[in-house]
Amino acid sequence: MSLLGPVEIRELAERLGVRPTKKLGQNFVIDAGTVRRIVRVADLRPDDVVIEVGPGLGSLTLALLPEVRGVVAVEIDPVLATQLPLTVAKHAPEFADRLTVVPADAMRVLPGELPEEKPTALVANLPYNVSVPVVLHLLETLPSLRAVLIMVQSEVADRLAAGPGSKVYGIPSLKAAWYADVRRAGPVGRTVFWPIPNVDSGLVAMTRRQPPETTASREAVFAVVDAAFAQRRKTLRAALASWAGTAAAAEQALRAAGVDPTLRGEQLSIEDFARIAEKHP
């Protein structure tokens, strides 16, 4: 098996008439060392089925295939989706039967569109402009996922992995924490991409865990989170007034949950928000 090098990637793109687009947030990884590192950090098991979002020209796909039982590649670009099996057949024919390509939008793909054997890990170089919605959608719709390793814009990585009290802690941090323990897993330099982006990237690792114990639904908890950060500078009493009906009702719910109404949303954990959701008036 051989991985794709920078020259091969550019030649393949030229032959296909593919140009990375800002609309799809495409930046192809052209460094073989980086894709090997991603696979290593992902800590995959031989019996894992990996879902890869936006495989592009197949750099990461080729590195994943020897390590797992199967790779489900979700690709929105029909040209790239058609080419990927051909690339694998050429560079890794002994692993070609492990690949399944699903031509779909990862933000909308549903379990019924995937193979019967559901993915246990998400490993992907996610497009910058849709990274958070994609990972939250897949965590919600694929409870089979036990682990995640994604490469995203560095600022997004910081937000996803932030804890209460951090300046960048917010909605992505809290919603990711509902599903998993989240951590930064290292920086990624700009020069490993084509075209070279004008932002830094980073790896984020997630390990699935049970959501907080609560009688409130996930939707109800997320509604409180959204309300709390819609007016980030306000106290929870003020920010949750529209959610609760009045500021007084918000204060009542907060006190019932054991939360100081003068705090702000960035000071609370996902468990705190779950308790607040339970006390909806």
Image (cartoon, rainbow, N blue to C red):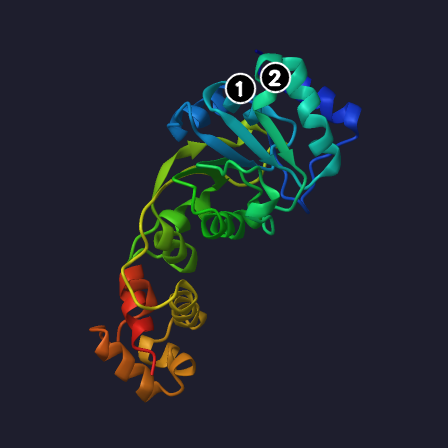
Identify which residue is drawn at 52% across, 53% down: 133
Q: Is residue 65 left or right of residue 24?
A: left
| Image position of 255 with respect to 180: above or below | below
Pointer 1: residues within 10 angstroms few (<14), some, or many (20+)? Answer: some
Q: Amino acid at mark 2?
A: Gly
Q: Amino acid at mark 1?
A: Ala
Question: 62 or 163, which lies in front?
Answer: 62
Q: Secondary structure at mark 2?
A: loop
Judging by the rendered image, the residue that carries numbered circle 2 is 5
Residue 32 is tagged as 1
Asked whether residue 161 appears in the rendered view, the answer is yes
Seen in the picture, residue 4 relative to 21 is either above or below; the reply is: above
The first of marks 2 and 1 along the sequence is 2
Q: Are marks 2 and 1 in contact (CB under 8 Å)?
A: yes
Q: How far apart are labels 2 and 1 at the CA level?
A: 7 Å
Question: Which one is nearer the viewer's eye here, 85 or 203?
Answer: 85
Query: Can residue 269 be seen here?
Result: no
Residue 101 is left or right of residue 259, and the answer is: right
Q: Is residue 105 left or right of residue 133?
A: right
Where does the image place residue 126, in percent across and percent down from the top left?
54, 40
Which residue sits furthest front? 116
Q: Residue 187: percent from the left, percent from the top?
A: 42, 34
The residue located at (22%, 75%) in the rendering is 260
Q: Answer with the quarter of the image where residue 47 lies.
A: top left
Q: Quadrant of residue 101?
A: top right
Is the N terminus in the top left, top right, bottom left or bottom right quadrant?
A: top right
Give SS at disc 1. helix
Q: Could you classify mark 2 by the number of other residues whose Cα lies within 10 Å: few (under 14), some (14-19), or many (20 or more)?
A: some
